Image (spheres, helix red, strand yellow):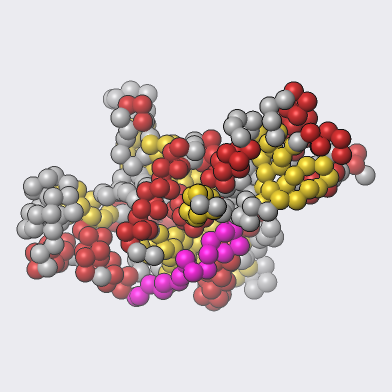
Amino acid sequence: MTIKRALKLQENLVALCRRRGFIFPGSDLYGGLANTFDYGPLGTLMKNNIQSCWSREFIQKRLNCFAFDSSILLHPDVWKASGHVDCFTDPMSVCLECNARIRVDQLLSQKLGREWNTPLDVTEYDTALKTHNIACPGCAKTHCFQRTKHFNLLFRTNMGATDETSEWINLRPETAQGAYINFSNVQCAMRAKLPFGIGQIGKSFRNEISPGQFLFRTREFEQMELQFFTFPSDSDEWMQYWIKECMHFLTTHGISQDNVRLRVHEQKELAHYARATTDIEFHYPFGWKELWGIANRTDSDLIKHMRASGKNLHYFDPITHKEVLPHIVEPALGLGRLMLAMLVDAYQEEIVLGRKRTVLRLHEDIAPYRLAVLPLVNKDALINFSEDLFKTLATKLCVDYDTSGSIGRRYRRQDEIGTPLCITIDFETLDDNRVTVRDRDSMEQKRISIDKLLAAAGVTQLPLSFKAF
């Protein structure tokens, strides 16, 4: 697919997301706030499904991983100890012609190649901009940049009842540190033995220099992260394990194998805390970009917090009777990036019987609705039957109900929002208790009994309670 075609499909996808209630521009009533988005009814359902799938696969199904939810506001010393106050920066310049703020490393990487992702001294960035005649992406002028400086990405707010007593505090830029400072609390409360993981989903905030590309990079975003604590000698092996698990999660939840690849960071690219990092990249319409990062963070974070707090964060090994400082393997994923990847991968336009059909081929666990209940015509007998069926199915599944327009138009609407199956109720249903099931991807239809439908939906299963036995 050509770049032009890919970007056109992205434009159509963004329009569909707004039209069908997935994503709305933030503060749209007041003209919008750049790079902020509100999740509409379908976007919220899809986002919740993604979170549930991640939690099930990385926490719920594992004997040694535990759910956690840390505070967005942490003690200021946490961010000093972690290095965020001094080192959480990006190289920034400002165009003297149009006042655009430019993230210099990304601009150089885009124009000259990936090697410019490697952190440099600010003077080296300035030299590269001049030597290679790099133009401002805002106004296309060259030799127009201010001197590059390090820009701290922390968001700050005030905590306190009055201006006189308030103090500056940072919104968390990542969920990870909350897990690290609670390592001992979780380990003791859950009687956990190494190796074990702490997983959480939560919002983070970064004052990005140049956010953009729809959901890909925003200043307010949600992370799904697992902090996996292991014996130091086993950390490399566990990192390879989690790389495979992350890739398996993507390809079993609707992401095409052709659209993902692994990229191992070179030594000069590694963050100061990392022994090794591997990115799972996705082929977005705007290029191959990081979707999921898996890093071996060693014991760097625990050492910093021990030094700053004066508290012992070692793990006592009951087998060797010795203290161990665990290493941490971190699979870190942005929810917005994953949702965008799933939408991009699922979005298709095709010609059926001479007419364009737009379809989201979302995985059934990810789609906003599992089923749609559609009475064939707007007659009382069919409406009453359909509403009762909807209420029964909705006890187990997220189900849509639609009576507006012809059945063909309603099928197309459900195709656009990714609903895997449509259930049509007609007059024959009232006599034989059978419905028509239509498949989204193949558009094939078959007639089945309502009893079979309810069994497949799990409605007729006994509830898991003591009385059921």
Looking at the picture, tell me which residue is in the foreground, 238 or 187. 238
Q: Quadrant of the C terminus?
A: top right
Q: Is residue 210 left or right of residue 446?
A: left
Name the quadrant containing residue 164: top left
**Does residue 95 show up magenta in the picture?**
no
Q: Is residue 84 left or right of residue 188?
A: left
Q: Position of residue 372 (x, y in %)?
A: 66, 40
Looking at the picture, tell me which residue is in the foreground, 213 or 407. 407
Q: Residue at x 56, y 43 (%)?
A: 412
Looking at the picture, tell me which residue is in the foreground, 195 or 324. 195
Residue 200 in view in this figure = no
Residue 83 sits above or below residue 325 on the image = above
Q: Position of residue 74 (x, y in %)?
A: 43, 42
Q: Residue at x 57, y 46 (%)?
A: 415
Which region shows up in magenta? 251-267
Q: Position of residue 461 (x, y in %)?
A: 84, 45
Q: Is residue 415 left or right of residue 378?
A: left
Q: Quadrant of the N terminus?
A: bottom left
The single residue placed furthest to the right in the displayed view is 469
